[in-house]
Image (cartoon, rainbow, N blue to C red):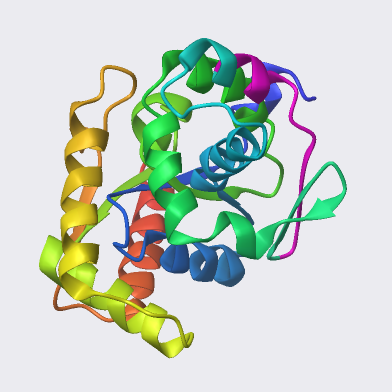
Amino acid sequence: MANNSTLSTIPVIAIDGPSASGKGTVAQLVAEKLNFHYFDSGALYRIVAFEAYKNNIEWNDAEMLGELAKNLKIQFSRNEIYLDGERITEAVRSEEMSSGASQVATHPQVRNALLDLQCSFRKAPGLVVDGRDMGSVIFKDAVLKIFLTASVEIRAERRYKQLINKGLNANYAQILADLQSRDERDSWRSAAPLIQTADALLLETSKCSIEEAVKLVLNAYEISNKKP
């Protein structure tokens, strides 16, 4: 891995926000436009939840989860996720693993175990990363920090439509309640809670399309590059 002084010259755009806010889609498109690398930090916690589930480890067992997270052999290739060489993309994208990710992410033992791995995604020419604590904890020196959010009702509606379009069963009331629970858990956890930092730009997307959000982020990045 490059040394810290070299890494600090590689620009990072950190996009944080609550579940189903659209930050992942925006981050991917911004990365494509800039020809930057993209990293979905939330996928790591989904993988931990998935592997724990497979090994009958409870999502509230902080010590066991921390040990498990230290030894994961994870590979990202394009939009695919591999664990120990096995493709697990759809498995970790399930609603159950999404809920599990929110639960395992509350444990400092898990977050500490994944710290170096997350930092290793910072590679030239630049990185666009989304998550809950990318700008507040992992990449505090990001050249641009975005806090991307929308009302919980709008986010629930988007998730509902997304699942229906995939041909899956979905219940709006259940999705809404689940998102509200996740928001509370993510915002009030002791380890790296979801917050908008003072230097993060708020991007509210309740009445904003993905294309508009991407344009706003790109414009903000262009402005940040002009600062002395």
Q: Position of residue 2 (x, y in %)?
A: 77, 24
Q: Position of residue 136 (x, y in %)?
A: 34, 29
76 within the magenta span: yes
Q: Position of residue 184 (x, y in %)?
A: 16, 38
Q: Position of residue 102 (x, y in %)?
A: 37, 39
- Direction right: furthest residue: 85
Residue occupying image coordinates x 60% and y 33%: 52
> Measured along the vertical axis of the image, is residue 217 above or below residue 64?
below
Please identify the quadrant where the C terminus is shown. Answer: top left
Residue occupying image coordinates x 70% and y 25%: 6
Q: Which residues are magenta?
A: 66-78
Total numbered badges shown on the rendered structure: 0
Residue 35 in view in this figure: no
Near-viewer residue (177 or 56): 56
Query: Relative to residue 10, is residue 60 drawn left or right?
Result: left
> Measured along the vertical axis of the image, is residue 222 above or below residue 158?
above
> Measured along the vertical axis of the image, is residue 206 above or below residue 89?
below
5 within the magenta span: no
Near-viewer residue (218 or 224): 218
The image quadrant that residue 209 belongs to is bottom left
> Measured along the vertical axis of the image, is residue 206 above or below residue 9?
below
Residue occupying image coordinates x 54% and y 38%: 49
Query: Relative to residue 208, is residue 160 drawn left or right?
Result: right
Near-viewer residue (133 or 171): 171
Residue occupying image coordinates x 60% and y 31%: 56
The image quadrant that residue 105 belongs to is top left
Query: Relative to residue 211, is residue 31 drawn left or right?
Result: right
Please identify the quadrant where the N terminus is shown. Answer: top right
Residue 132 in view in this figure: yes
